[in-house]
Image (cartoon, helix red, strand yellow):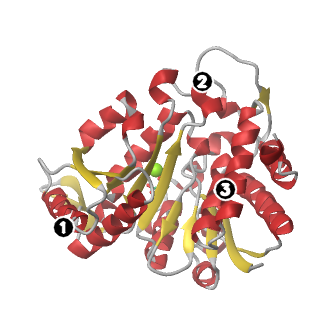
Amino acid sequence: MGTYTIALLPGDGIGPEVITEAVKVLEVVGDSFGHTFRFSEGLIGGRAVDATGFPLPPETLDLCRGADAVLLGAVGGPKWDGLPSAQRPETGLLDLRKNLRVYANLRPVVAYPSLVEASPLRPEVVSGTDFLIVRELTGGLYFGKPKERTQRNGQRQAVDTLIYTEEEIGRVVHLAFGLAAQRRKLVTSVDKANVLESSRLWREVVNEVAKGYPEVRLEHMLVDACAMEMVRRPTRFDVIVTENMFGDILSDEGAGVVGSIGLLPSASLGASPPALYEPVHGSAPDIAGQGIANPLGAILSVALLLRHSCNLEAEARAVEEAVAYVLSAGYRTRDLLPPVGAGEYKVVSTSQMGDMVAHALKENVPRKT
Ligand code: IPM
Ligand code: MG
């Protein structure tokens, strides 16, 4: 029976809507399994800029540092797109990741049997897809310096820097191998070593780390080839480990493969707590406030939080099974409807979907059926 402090950062757009449902589910976990979750809420992103002038106010960072885990919704929106980079909502998120030193971002990509029709791929291609993208999160192009706009010979020019140290590569690759050892024991390291110096170092370090995991098979794959393989044969992957920008792009592709980005959760882990949990989807300003957003990415992020920050594996599984059950019972938010044709589905709102999962969890429906 544990007590856990959770910092909630709902953020912008659909963030608050999906976090409300995630909290609903976490409260049921508390009641059903006898744990106490204490919530404290902070500002981040555009709403933080509006209220304080900063996308990551110092109070928010303090709140997170004092928590066992951080659960974030999403940041950003057209309202703040014109702001200078220091005030962009996204900068708040990047600063949070950097300050919490959560260098490894885990993004599981799973095709639920009842959802194969939501995928644009043929059922026989997508069925059985179950891989984990381990994305380096605090280095590379996102953070390298110089990163600026300058003027040269009367022309505007801009630079971003792709830089990695062997330490930054080694720690995330270790983590990926450790996870692969508990799964199907295949690591696909993705780079662009035929062109980029940073990728050649990446590959070298990966080969060195691999020696410590003789039971895990390693393959290297160029990022362009990986993008193609992911739609051709998604079931061939187990753990994909890659640098920050490639991981950002490939994880959206993975979401497309299994049907909707609204489904994907993520966990960002560092050497010490707190870890950060967020759905992979963004703030989706176009559908914000309409009650139609898919809360499952946020709810499944709660499962990852229970597993990685609270060491509550049974509780994590119970949440995942409740989600799988609700999907198998035919309930869908709009994003989960098949891209072509219509089946026999019950279309539900954001809060109804949260209620369905909470109910399935409370009544332990998956175990009884
Ligand atoms: C993600 C998002 C973020 C990223 C944005 C919002 C800064 O796309 O988490 O994948 O690029 O990391
Ligand atoms: Mg992204």
> For the point 25% across and 53% down, which residue is it?
218
Lower sequence index among marks 1 and 2: 2
Q: Is residue 293 above or below residue 266?
A: above
Q: Nearer the viewer, mark 3 or mark 2?
A: 3
Q: Position of residue 32 (x, y in %)?
A: 84, 64
Residue 301 position within the rendered picture, expressed as x and y whole percent measured from the top left: 62, 57
- Position of the C terminus by quadrant: top right
Q: Quadrant of residue 26?
A: bottom right
Residue 317, numbered label: 3
Number of on-image labels: 3
Query: Please, what secondary structure does the residue beneath circle 3 have?
Result: helix
| Mark nearer the N terminus (3 vs 2) | 2
Place of residue 97 in the rendered image (x, y in percent of width and height, measured from the top left): 47, 70
Q: Nearer the viewer, mark 1 or mark 2?
A: 1
Image quadrant in which you'd find residue 315: bottom right
Residue at position x 13%, y 58% from top? 200
Looking at the rendered structure, the kind of residue marked 2 is Glu
Question: Which residue shows up at 27% across the image and 70% down it?
Answer: 170
Q: Amino acid at mark 3?
A: Arg
Few, some or many residues within 10 Å of mark 3 (<14, 14–19, 20+): some
Quarter of the rendering occupied by the N terminus: bottom right
